[in-house]
Amino acid sequence: MCSATEKSLNPLVKLIQKVLQENDPSLKVVFAVGAGISTSAGIPDFRSPKTGLYHNLSKLNLPYPEAVFDIDFFAKNPKPFNLLCNELYPGKFLPTKFHYLIKLFHDKNLLKRCYTQNIDNLERLAGLPDDKVVEAHGSFVKNHCIKCHEELSIKEFRSFLVKDEIPKCSKCKNYVKPDIVFFGEALPHEFFDKWDEDLSDGIDVCIVAGTSLQVYPFATLPGETPDSTWRILINREKCGDFEMNSRKKDLVLLGDADEIASMLIKQLGWEDDLNKLLENG
Ligand code: CNA
């Protein structure tokens, strides 16, 4: 294991440079990311001590922090989630350098897919097209009644939020929530379908970033890649399969996601491309 330094990025840099020099479009890179790639945008993650959402939820008097994303708890007491929803609602935050790193992989024809646990929409805001993003834990794009599943438009949903009211179903008057996946709910089919498709097509590099790898089934992704896959962890801490089942072709880069993204962009000579994205963003 090593903290990220320019030198420690070498295996990844060399691999990418070789492919680009040979104009070989066959390198298949998959990202699997979590809340840690968005903290520099101003969105707290779940579990970081002192700054994470779970630490700050104490004011909401929850029986346990995860209750805020528990579907049974929400059905009885939707207020804590609604407060959080107002805080996290897309539109207030901008993509980070790490999001633009993923976009650069896409622009260089190296990105096969970006699997995200995040619900902040920043991958799309950075410019990734629909077919390259899999929002494993859903998104705020649609809202449904938790009882009769009637859809409530974003406009109507927002009109409740701005009045500080709990969004309710126009048909049965039960609570409405965005289609983000709560504990106790199934993940979208797309997550399983696309992952199976990508696995059978082959994954050369799997870059896991900004996640504690504690939420399942997402946490199983790095372990499901074949031994031939280069697995890169970019995170403040070592975690999940990188800790429990480390492999020969693992590269663990500990540190800040944006700083590591900057080092990588510099070493790959992609700085001008990044600047263009930032100018147009
Ligand atoms: P987590 O469990 O809070 O873990 C975050 C990880 O990122 C930790 O290991 C941190 O050490 C690490 N980290 C934090 N900041 C940085 C940084 N700047 N650079 C590098 N590493 C950093 O969050 P997970 O994503 O693993 O948990 C999955 C949950 C979090 C999903 O269900 C998400 O919906 C949920 N979530 C999403 C958001 C968002 O959309 N931005 C925010 C908070 C929680």
Image (spheres, helix red, strand yellow):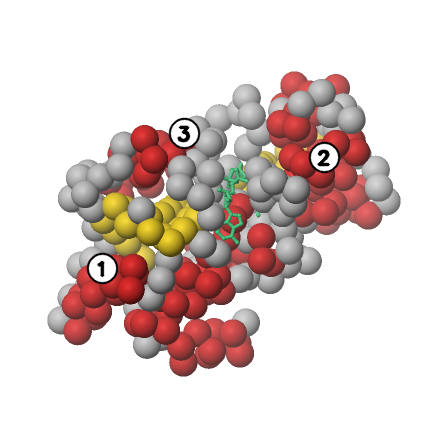
Residue 143: x and y in percent read 64, 38
Amino acid tagged 2: Leu
Question: Residue at the spot x=47%, y=31% of the render?
Answer: 215
Q: Which residue is mark 3?
A: 217
> Which residue is at the far front?
2
**Which tag, 1 or 2, sits closer to the chain's start?**
1
Whether residue 5 is visible here, answered yes or no, is: yes
For label 2, count other residues whose C-alpha is less than 10 Å away and answer few (under 14), some (14-19) or many (20+): some
| Residues tagged 2 and 3 counted as in contact (Cβ below 8 A) | no
| Residues tagged 3 and 1 counted as in contact (Cβ below 8 A) | no
Q: Which mark is residue 126?
A: none
For label 1, count other residues whose C-alpha is less than 10 Å away and answer few (under 14), some (14-19) or many (20+): few
In whole angstroms, how far apart are the C-alphas of marks 2 and 3?
25 Å
Q: Which mark is residue 57?
A: 2
Residue at disc 2, secondary structure: helix
Question: Residue at the spot x=32%, y=72% of the render?
Answer: 267
Q: Is the residue 258 above or below the residue 115 in the image?
A: below
**Which tag, 3 or 1, sits closer to the chain's start?**
1
Quarter-of-image position of residue 184 = top right
Judged left or right of residue 247, residue 256 is right
Residue 199: x and y in percent read 24, 40
Question: Residue at the spot x=60%, y=58% of the render?
Answer: 41
Q: Is the residue 258 above or below the residue 229 in the image?
A: below
Residue at disc 1, secondary structure: helix
For label 3, count other residues whose C-alpha is less than 10 Å away and answer few (under 14), some (14-19) or many (20+): few
Nearer mark to the viewer, of 1 and 2: 1
Nearer mark to the viewer, of 3 and 1: 1
